[in-house]
Image (tube, rainbow, N blue to C red):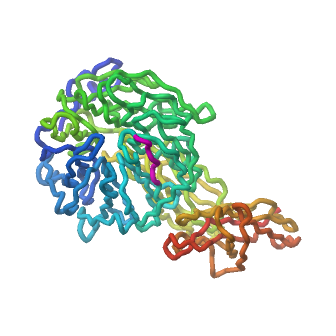
Amino acid sequence: MTRFAPALTAAVVGAFVPAPLFAQQFVHSSNALPGSVWTEGVEPADVDNDGDIDLFFADGDGFSSAGTKRQNRLYINKLEVTPNTWADESVLRLGTNSSNAKMAISGDVNGDGWIDAMFCNAFNTDRPFLYVNRGSSGPGIFVERGVQAGFSTAYSSASGQFGDLDNDGDLDLILCDSGSSFLGGSGDKPHLFFNDGSGIFTENAAALGAPTKKAHMDVQLVDIDGDFDLDFFGANRASNSGGNHYLMLNDGTGTFTDVSNLLPGTSTNVYEAEVGDLDNDSDLDLFFVSLSGFAEGSVRNNLNTGSLGFSSGSTLSGSDDNEVGLIDFDNDGDYDIAIGSLGSSEKLFRNNGNLSFSTVSSDFTSISDSTLDLGIADFDNDGDYDIVTAQGESNPGQFQNKIYLNTGSADTLAPVVSAIESIGVQPANGPWVVRAQVRDQVMDDGHDWVSASVDYFVTTAAGSTPNTAGTATRMAGGLWRFAMDDTAEGAGLTLNYTLTFTDWAGNSTTTGVQVVPLGPVCGIVPYGLAAGGANVLVMDAIGSTAPGSGFDVVVTAPGQPAVATIVAFGRDSYPFAGGTGLLDLANYYTLVVTPVVGSTATSTWHLPNNPSLIGAVLNFQAAIPDPSVVGGVALSNGVEIGICN
């Protein structure tokens, strides 16, 4: 393992030069990966939880139309035996499954602590293949369960990404679909699937509401507008009305609004864009790559000016570039750019600050090959981040996927917490959820190699509850969700928590203690999430909650004849039918059925003019029959009414 001396490291970090002081920081490891076949995509993941990174490869011939199908592949890292040794265990671990795969994506879809994977297949030849990890009964051995999980339709998918789109603690999915023609034709719409928590997915096209666009290449789930939910950005290799690319904002429940026209113009030959904070101002910028002759580059997010908007940065001359990843290769605390090029060797752009970049021409072993994708991870566990490339399309003699080992200095920079959600006064009886955005040395298709944890205690009039570990779940794109159960049985005065983020190299950041006041609910507080299949109910309330006044509970339920509204004294959280029950049914009060007029059902509630009611709480949740979901019932979010002056 090579290390820079401290003085030389400082010189490299501080240099403002177009090329690094040391050539070939990323050195090709010859013949590390077996096989020579058309590969479209690569996905690093630790599939067997042994502490090193393995590799999925999406193979399959065909540029714009289907060629030969290839075995879905998984290479296991044998670091514990011999460093930089990989074993092709594809059939053993994935079974005999072939397709025209364009990309492999990964995530823990059923919440069991083990990585699962999906192969995104193109040309409408195969449905998506979902591989579910057997976990402790067979670490890193998968069962293909796409049909059982809700994926029975073939698409023309270039990619996709898992992410928690409705803030319920599990991973949902958006998949590309280019329609009948992969790069032209009339195009199609991406597909949004909600996860029920067990790894069963239901498509909800209405919630996404995406327009039709051609040649959809990529999915990035990121918080582009800084409101602590995942928005959808998708790059397209075509000219499309309403903006060449997708940009759709999430309202927090997984319902999206199209704002694609906010993005500045790019060429019509974009293959990918990566999203990350390129200027260290705590919002997320973009970096585009495309075919030769169409110089792309950075796009600045101007959210810090007060509203979401974008402006193009300087372009960088490119060859036929297919892939971009963000990596702080010089350890100076900002994202540099790694480019996978089909038309030349791989290259780096050094981030000089303020979205200014300079070409680093000699930090890769110079190999002219046909790169279609790259991945960034620490493959030899030496504390720095290496690069893997996938080869295909041009010149079959170059179809050799490659590992480039990083011989530079180890990562010594701890993750940076960009923002923590302010949740205000919370109900004393919990549970409580908070989200936070973090960045580290890498961002590549949603992966940053950071883990997280939350510890908390609750103060009461009698003292404090014991320190407790909450639940941390990765949402995507550096966004995390932290859930904390009520350990004070409703008697809490303050919630006190700290968040810890640790990167692959072992660098950690722990926040200061965050204090959240707890108290009686006053007013109208929506909580929880709507859940269901084709019919998603959204509940809210308007009016006054003071004694002697009244309020309306409004449920949006388009296409429904009526809605059942259940009322209880207190909230809860438990699986029920196709969603989550949010009422304490041990303290059930009543149920009313309200007709839908237009698209809403409105029930009116009057409060007696009795001051003794102050401090009382009513909880509401709506339900409708819905045969498309498990249990046949779709549920709304909850609304809590705290009676107060």
**Where residue 11 sits in the image (x, y, percent)?**
30, 22
Left or right: residue 393 compared with residue 502: left
Left or right: residue 133 compared with residue 469: left
Q: Quadrant of the C terminus?
A: bottom right
How many tags in the picture? Answer: 0
* Residue 569 is at least partly visible in this image: no
Bounds of the magenta segment: 185-191
Q: Quadrant of residue 24?
A: top left
Magenta span dominant secondary structure: loop
**Where residue 70 sits in the image (x, y, percent)?**
20, 52
Front-lying residue, 418 or 142: 142
**Where residue 227 sits in the image (x, y, percent)?**
57, 46
Q: Residue at 69% across / 71% down in the picture?
A: 562
Q: Quadrant of residue 374?
A: top left
Front-lying residue, 8 or 645: 645
Q: Residue at 33% across / 29% down in the picture?
A: 291
**Where residue 632 sits in the image (x, y, percent)?**
53, 75
* Residue 7 is at least partly visible in this image: yes
Up-down relation of residue 344 to residue 465 (above or below): above
Q: Quadrant of residue 89?
A: bottom left
Front-lying residue, 501 or 169: 169
Magenta segment includes 313 = no
Q: Residue at 35% across / 56% down in the picture?
A: 154
Q: Quadrant of the N terminus?
A: top left
